[in-house]
Image (cartoon, grey):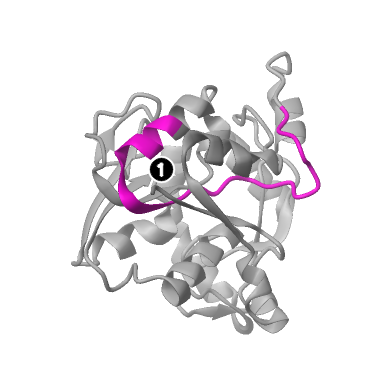
């Protein structure tokens, strides 16, 4: 199954893959129903989750029902348990909206919710993250998760995110993490897609971020909280929700 999922991810264009997932998802959910693992986003439980990964496949990480990954479930739990996101009126900008969140956030009547991306079929506004058309100080909340590793000029992208965030606003800017790496690594001379997937985790990533990522966000002007939310819940919950132990949530504020 791991080889099949890897082939599908690296062969089928992402927009088509999104459309196909709506058809396949109910069948897989039925086949894997059980009580071992639970997706906190919809509360459904399964005997196991699916493997996922463009390069090295990770076992038991893709929820059969919402198609959430570890990072999505971690963010959902943080928003639900530690913030007022689900109750307080807010103007929200969501880059490259994830399927696990898109319809659920759209239904929240207290949110003024805008999605943006260059290629996603779920985007309300087609926009270049390095040259946004939005006004300064416009959004209370920004979600930009697993996007910056795709952007050659991530400094400019971070500056634009800071610009459109309101003073006092919150931006959650998740990235693929190698917690053992201190310094971010880039190498444009590596052009083979297979080799790039092996080194960068995905063929279309342009860098592997290290722990210096947080300092770079601070240099842009953000106040950054490095939150290990898996350390605040029980080990049983980490296993039950299929989270990645030690994953850091970069929760950024504009003062």
* Horizontal and vertical percent position of residue 62: 59, 61
Q: Residue furthest right?
A: 180
Residue 85, placed above or below residue 190: below
Of the pair 254 and 74, the residue shown nearer to us: 254
**Residue 157 sits in quarter:** top left
Of the pair 163 and 109, the residue shown nearer to us: 163
* Residue 33 in sight: yes
Residue found at x 68% / y 39%: 212
**Residue 136 sits in quarter:** top left
Of the pair 248 and 54, the residue shown nearer to us: 248
Q: Residue furthest top?
A: 189
Residue 244, placed above or below residue 160: below
In the picture, the quarter occupied by the N terminus is: bottom right
Task: State the extent of the magenta-drawn residues as a range.
Answer: 159-185
- Mark 1 highlights which residue? 96
Of the pair 126 and 129, the residue shown nearer to us: 129
Residue found at x 50% / y 60%: 67
Left or right, residue 155 beside residue 106: right
Left or right, residue 220 beside residue 105: right
Asked if the magenta segment contains residue 33, the reply would be: no
- Secondary structure beneath dot 1 equals loop
* Residue 41 in sight: no
Asked if the magenta segment contains residue 165, the reply would be: yes
Residue found at x 81% / y 47%: 180
* Horizontal and vertical percent position of residue 114: 25, 47
Marks counted in the figure total 1
Q: Residue furthest front?
A: 255
Residue found at x 52% / y 36%: 148
**Residue 234 sits in quarter:** bottom right
């Amino acid at each position: 199954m791991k080889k099949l999922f890897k082939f599908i991810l690296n062969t089928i264009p992402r927009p088509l893959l999104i459309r196909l997932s709506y058809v396949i998802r109910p069948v897989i959910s039925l086949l894997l129903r059980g009580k071992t693992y639970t997706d906190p986003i919809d509360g459904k439980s399964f005997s196991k989750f699916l493997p996922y990964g463009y390069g090295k496949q990770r076992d038991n990480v893709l929820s059969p029902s919402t198609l959430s990954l570890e990072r999505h479930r971690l963010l959902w739990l943080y928003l639900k348990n530690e913030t007022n996101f689900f109750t307080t009126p807010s103007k929200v900008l969501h880059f490259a909206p994830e399927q696990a969140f898109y319809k659920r956030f759209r239904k929240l009547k207290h949110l003024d919710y805008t999605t943006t991306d260059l290629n996603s079929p779920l985007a309300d506004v087609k926009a270049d993250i390095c040259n946004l058309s939005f006004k300064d100080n416009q959004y209370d909340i920004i979600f930009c998760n697993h996007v910056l590793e795709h952007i050659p000029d991530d400094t400019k992208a971070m500056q634009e995110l800071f610009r459109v965030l309101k003073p006092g606003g919150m931006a959650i800017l998740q990235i693929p993490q190698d917690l053992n790496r201190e310094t971010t690594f880039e190498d444009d001379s590596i052009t083979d897609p297979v080799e790039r997937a092996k080194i960068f985790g995905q063929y279309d990533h342009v860098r592997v971020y290290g722990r210096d990522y947080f300092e770079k966000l601070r240099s842009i002007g953000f106040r950054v909280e490095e939150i290990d939310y898996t350390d605040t819940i029980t080990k049983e919950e980490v296993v039950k929700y299929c989270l990645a132990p030690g994953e850091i949530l970069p929760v950024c504020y504009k003062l």
